[in-house]
Image (tube, rainbow, N blue to C red):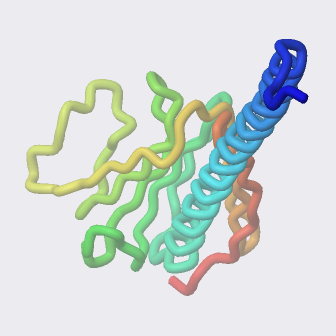
Amino acid sequence: MRAGFTLIEMLISIMLTAIVFTYIYATLGSVKSGHARYNESVREVTKSQSIFSLFSRDLAQIRKAPVIIHEAGYDRISFITKNSIYDIARPWVHYYISANSRALIRIEATKQIDFFGRNYIGDTNGTYFFADKLAEECSSFRISDRKGRFDILLRCEKIAPIVMTLYKGDK
């Protein structure tokens, strides 16, 4: 008897090894793409939750009747609140959708500013403000102020839609 493998046996073992490695590679690719989809889903939910939380804190601590401007597709809202992420005492907060980038913007300022004027280029009276882009590619932003509550609808492409009802804080 000979000790060793024939050429046919070697080809069969190489083919079986290739099939096993192909299966393992496909499985790892599937796991990797599933993990990427999961991470993207987590990012969307986390972004929606952070926007929801910020809306909730701002509107629950509102201190002056809001100014709401209704436009086609997007609303704008301005109000004074006790909630500040930049340590401003009783800041003016503005939420709106940027016309150019379709991004939801939150502006926190020391005084009321007409950010929505046609040719606004900056404030000259010493007012400080901070702007944060909260979400991109927004298709709808609606706010209604009814009988002690705010109804809010926000739709953006990369985050889950936000539909919420918040009850006003004391004035």
| Residue 164 vs residue 48, the one in the foreground | 48
**Looking at the image, residue 35 lies above or below residue 84:** above
**Looking at the image, residue 21 lies above or below residue 132:** above
Image quadrant in which the N terminus is located: top right
Residue drawn 50% across and 36% down?
A: 103
x and y percentages locating residue 168 in the rendered image: 63, 77
Instruction: Tell me where residue 111 sits by quadrant.
Output: bottom left
x and y percentages locating residue 10 in the rendered image: 81, 20
| Residue 9 vs residue 169, the one in the foreground | 9
Is residue 143 at least partly visible in the picture?
no
**Looking at the image, residue 73 lies above or below residue 63:** above
Task: Farthest residue to the bottom: give it.
Answer: 170
Residue drawn 16% across and 44% down?
A: 123
**Is 162 on the left or on the right of 105, as rendered?**
right
- How many numbered marks appear? 0
Residue drawn 65% across and 42% down?
A: 36
**Is 35 on the left or on the right of 13, as rendered?**
left
Instruction: Tell me where residue 166 sits by quadrant.
Output: bottom right
| Residue 12 vs residue 106, the one in the foreground | 12
x and y percentages locating residue 156 in the rendered image: 65, 38
Task: Farthest residue to the front: give it.
Answer: 1
Residue drawn 41% across and 76% down?
A: 83
Is residue 68 at least partly visible in the picture?
yes
